[in-house]
Amino acid sequence: MESIALALPVLLLAIGIEYYVARRKKVDVYKFKDTISNLSIGILDRVAGMFTAGFFFFVYDYLHKQFALFTIEPNWITWILLFFFVDFLWYWYHRSSHEINIFWAVHVIHHSSEEFNYSVGTRITIFQSLARLLFWAFLPIIGFPALMIMPVLLIQGVYPFFVHTRLIGKLGWIEKVLVTPSHHRVHHANNEEYLDKNYGGVFIFWDKLFGTFKEETNEVHYGLTHQLHTHSLLWQFFHFFLELYYSVKLTPGFRNKLGVLFGGPEQIDPAIREELEEIFLSRSRRKPVPAPFKRYVIIQLAAIIVVLIGMLYFYDKLDWIGMSGTSLIILITLINCGAILEQKRWVFNLEFTRFVLATSMIALFTKQPLIWLVVITALETVLVNYSSLRNIYMKNLIPTKKIIK
Ligand SMILES: [Zn+2]
Ligand SMILES: [Zn+2]
């Protein structure tokens, strides 16, 4: 966990450098809402990672002990072989994620950003890791021990982050061997000619071997073929699960239903999304988010990144309650940031929930009677003035909208 705690500032530094270089080159690479949404998904993945790291090791170790076909000792040949195997299985995991709906449901979130920069590289989720587990489960079954698998997965997993940039052009002979930013730009494109291409993680030759390679020639347009037009965290996570559910429900016959589940995303009628958006997303015309609220979102995000790095660094010293409580506050904060950007009317309830949770945790951990008194007084004050505080908050968030009590 300490290595991840140290890796996070490196990724953030890469984002900072890209932002700085793009501004100097006068290229518009980062959009405010898009970046906040990308980083929120990345933070959530790291929080989930804290709870699940042991689980993945346990599964690989269990499969190795129970089913290993060969005895593989670590030496330089087996390390290299393992790296190739990992990347080969990544190719098939990634290809399945685009061509099979139940896998696309968890991968789509990586592609819903309409931008392409290092912050998009952080759009990964625990659901994707679980889907990958099905493919990488072959590794311990072949005979690779979990102690070899975990570090290779870490290296192979970090590499793709660095190909999410528009600022690096083509890289000469490297283009022939490794996946480069140019290759991955094609992968993130919604241009017709670029769809379902360049699935490789580290090596590009898998795509050439299995007929999915496409060189970047025309200008790339990023995002989904039907864009989401929302930064709601919950919607980004779950919209395709809902689309798939309704699509299966509306399809008659068991065999046909299975056909939808295991078929490609092109089988899902786009009208289903439109209907679901009518039900689940408010269609009210939104005003631009006021500057103080934008700063408030940045401060919240910066604060939880610091808390997250601290949690990862002191992972061994934290107890279960402290870790779960802090993770819940991080989760609420991320949903809160998304709700502010979307100017949701329920955002103040979320602020209040987080306030109650945070103050209760402070009281619980300090165990000081004086702190208890301050916490109870603060809670009481907020509760008594709840509706007037909510009105002030919402009037500032949506300046010209009338707030109904
Ligand atoms: Zn993909
Ligand atoms: Zn990507």
Image (spheres, grey):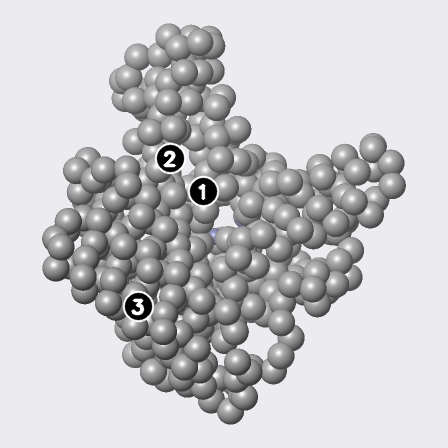
User: Contact, CB < 8 Å: mark 1 with mark 2?
Assistant: yes
Which element is circle 3 on?
helix
Identify the mark at residue 380; answer none if there is no mark: 3
User: Contact, CB < 8 Å: mark 2 with mark 3?
Assistant: no
Residue 8 point in image, percent of width and height: 26, 52
Instruction: Estimate the spatial distance between the alpha carbons at disc 2 and disc 3, rounded to whole Å.
Output: 38 Å
Amino acid on which disc 3 is placed: Glu
N-term mark: 1 or 2: 2
Identify the mark at residue 240; answer none if there is no mark: none
Identify the mark at residue 126; answer none if there is no mark: 1
Number of numbered callouts drawn: 3
Residue 126 point in image, percent of width and height: 45, 42
Q: Nearer the viewer, residue 397 or 217?
A: 397
* Residue 167 showing in the rendered view: no
Image quadrant of residue 373? bottom left
- Label 1: how many residues lie within 10 Å, few (<14), some (14-19) or many (20+)? some
